Structure formats: structure tokens, C-alpha cells
Image (cartoon, grey):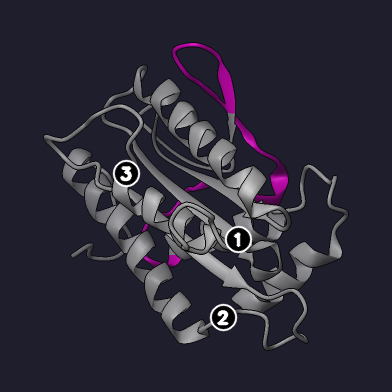
Amino acid sequence: MSLSLEDVVEEVMSKNTKDSKRLGALADYAKEQLEQYGLPGVQGGTGGELKIQGMARLKDWDIAYNFAGKNRLLISLKSLWRNASGTVPNRLDELMGETANVQQMSPEIVSGYVLLFDNQADSIRRNDGLLWSDYFQRAVNHIAIRKAPLWNQGLLEGAWFIRIDSSKPFGERIIDPEKTAREGESFFKSLLKELKIREPAISFSKVIE
């Protein structure tokens, strides 16, 4: 039986913070969503992260789709539970670095980013008065614009922010669940639309519009 997104959040929260497979349930969820929207044969999930070759080094990715012997779509999953002010700048640097690393090997690859952000980690930025969560989301959205012919390295094809409040009881942890669901649907569909444009020979199980 498929897990709901709220179930996924509950499963993630039940894991030790140092568990390298803590986001396994979220990876399974993302994999299932891609399959439901028409892309069979996606790799990743609780089976473990995938080692993907980049220009500089191998890098762990959570979700991958391989076609004709080459990775064509990758998704990176991250979570943020504490100290947004100290973590967000590093996460932005890591994100752009890991995407550029793989894009140097495969400029046509489609890449997406999913972040599970706990409101308990949030705080106000001193220099502009924005919440760190809003700043982070805006910054990522600014680079989630990678479509032909704008194939600059370090950009993304899509991003999905899942905002939660870990202090709430089960069933109430996802902030604005309807909006989150809409944004999730848009995220997965946008990745598949871009994949279809770049790899028209892929046999999707559903019509990608």
C-alpha cells in the first residue's frame, strides 16, 4: 500500500537523525510519483543512494532514471531540521556544486531537488527580514529554470519544498497540504515534460503533456 506524504513525514521523523537512510521513505514516495505520472523503471528509494559519476567525482543521488545505458534524470532529496541560518548557505553551495558536477558529464540531464524543511529550524535573517525558509526557497527557485537553450551548469529543472512542523501531531505536520500537493504534482510533471523533450524515444506509460 502506498504511503501518503504525511505517512512519509512520520516515517522520516521516526529515524535517527544520523541514519544515512533516513530519507528512504521520501525517496520511495518520489519514485512512486514518477511512476504514477508515466515513467516506469526509476531507480533508488530504500534500496540505497545511487553513485552517479560526475566530472570531478562520484556523487550520491537518491533517484535516477537510466535510458539506453545513460542516466537521464536525477533527483536529490534533503532535509533541514535545525539551525537554518547556519545550514542554508552551505546547502545552496552543495546543491549548485553537485548539479554542476554531473552536468559537466551529461549537459542534457534533467535534475530535480526536494527539500523537507521543518519550521522549528526557521529564524529571521538580519539583513533583509526574510525567514530563512523563504530565502532558501526563493534562491532555489531562481536556479530552477534550466531548460534548453539555457543549460547553464549549476541550474536545476525543478524544485519542491515540503514545509512541515515537527511539533504538530500526526496528520497536521504538513503546512498547507493542498498547496504542497499541487506543487509536488507540478514538480514531477515538469521534470517529465523536460525529459520527454530531450529524450523523445523513451516509452512513457502515460501521455506527458
Which range is magenta?
Answer: 36-59
| Residue at x 79% of width, y 66% of height | 13
> What kind of element bears circle 1?
strand
The dot on residue 116 is: 1
Tell me if I can see residue 2 in this picture: no
Decide if residue 29 is on the left or right side of residue 82: left
Image coordinates for residue 82, horizontal then vertical, percent: 73, 56
The dot on residue 143 is: 3
**Above or below 67: residue 170:** below
- Which residue type does callout 3 highlight? Ile
Q: Which residue is mark 2?
A: 175
| Residue at x 84% of width, y 46% of height | 19
* In front of the other: 185 or 39: 185
* In front of the other: 166 or 44: 166
Give whichever of discs 3 and 1 has the lower sequence position. 1
Mark pair 3, 1: CA separation: 18 Å
**Above or below 75: residue 72:** above
* In front of the other: 190 or 80: 80
Whether pointer 2 and pointer 1 mark residues with C-beta atoms closer than 8 Å, the reply is no
Give whichever of discs 3 and 2 has the lower sequence position. 3
